[in-house]
Image (cartoon, helix red, strand yellow):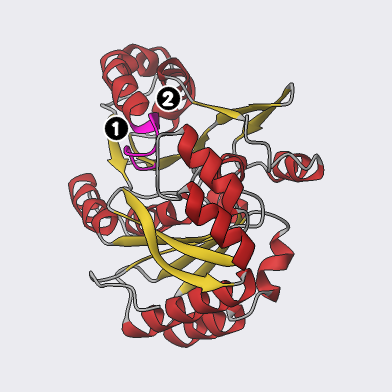
Amino acid sequence: MRMGLAIDASCDLPQAFLRQHNIAVMPIAVKLDGTVFKDDRDQEEIERFLYMKLAGTHAAETEPCSVEDVQRLFLDKLVLEHDCVFCLTITATRSPIHEHVLKASFAILKNYRQVRDRAGVPGPFLMRVVDTRNVFAGEGPAVFEAARLIQAGEAPPAIRERLGVVANHTYAYMLPRDLHHLRNRTKKKGDRSVSLFSAVVGTALDIKPLLRCFRGETGPVGKVRGFEHGAETLFDYAARRVRAGLMVPVVCVSYGGDLSELAKLPGYDGLRRACEETGATLLEAPMSITGMVNVGEGAVTLGFASEEHEPDF
């Protein structure tokens, strides 16, 4: 059986990994200041966005791929290239993408047969939609595990069950730079994770929150003085979790800017060493345009899957 993967553009994984596993990307349109960006994890488009210095624009609008867009992607391409596709999405609590893909799946599974018949492709087609229950780099561990299981020749039911377990045990952490930007964007979405008081006081005192997304719920779990100290705190914590043992041998990290800046942050060498010593893969990716619009340029997100625990920053 030919099995494939599809993700939405908010999932922060490197282009090399996407190409290696032939992972399809469902794009997100980002509109701001009269300019439209096609957020599909293309490096040139990300660089164009950064060059124009638009990440701090509060009025940006994001349009996730529509039901019709998902149908076209599958019926024009994926149902011909694969016999089963796992479609992994950003958590349904933060975006309508998961709902759009679910709605599209009904039409896809109803109409795929005639498409495959016309192309001379025999047999049925399966589509499985998985809510990663996470955001940005936090979507990565489930995708990494799906790719590993497909390569290992696992059957679709076993893969689907395993991905549900991974999604329920994946932790994503985010360290923002610009609290005012983050507060304005979350307020626009009806999210009160960062209050006006916290944004004002935090900016004045250079206090940064450490935010966590776990099982679809996002909120602060710690605070640090200064961005660089926050990065060191986050990377040291992640290194400890790596050494304690991961459910999936990968740590995904994304940065809202030039990726060469990520390695210069305090504590990052320690995380890299922990991954090397334990055999875990460290996947580094630029943050999606959608992510930068929502959390601000220069932010860091980090995701891994492990047994349930409480943060100890």
Can you say which quadrant of the picture contains the C terminus?
A: bottom left
The residue identified by callout 1 is 127
Q: Tag 2, which secondary structure? A: helix
Residue at 55%, 85% in the rendered image: 270
Answer above or below: position of 184 versus 164: above
Identify the element where label 1 is drawn. strand
In the rendered view, tell whether residue 120 sits above or below residue 58: above
Inspect the image, locate mark 2, and give the three-letter code of the amino acid beneath it.
Answer: Phe
Q: Is residue 9 visible?
A: no
The span picked out in magenta is: 90-98
Residue drawn at (64%, 54%), measured in percent from left and top? Answer: 256
How packed is label 1: few (under 14 Cα within 10 Å), some, or many (20 or more)? Answer: many
Instruction: Answer with left or right where residue 13 lies relative to residue 280.
Output: right
Q: Residue at x 58, y 81 (%)?
A: 267
Assess whether mark 1 and mark 2 are in contact (beta carbons under 8 angstroms): yes
71 or 214, which is in the foreground? 214
Mark nearer the N terminus (2 vs 1): 2
Magenta stretch containing residue 78, yes or no?
no
Q: Amino acid at mark 1?
A: Met
Residue 195 x, y percent position in the rendering? 45, 49
Which of 264/199 is in front? 199
The structure residue drawn at horizontal position 40% and vertical position 44%, both measured from the top left corner, is: 192
Residue 94 lies in the magenta-colored region? yes
How far from the left and from the top, in percent, is residue 121?
37, 23
- Name the residue that disc number 2 marks: 74
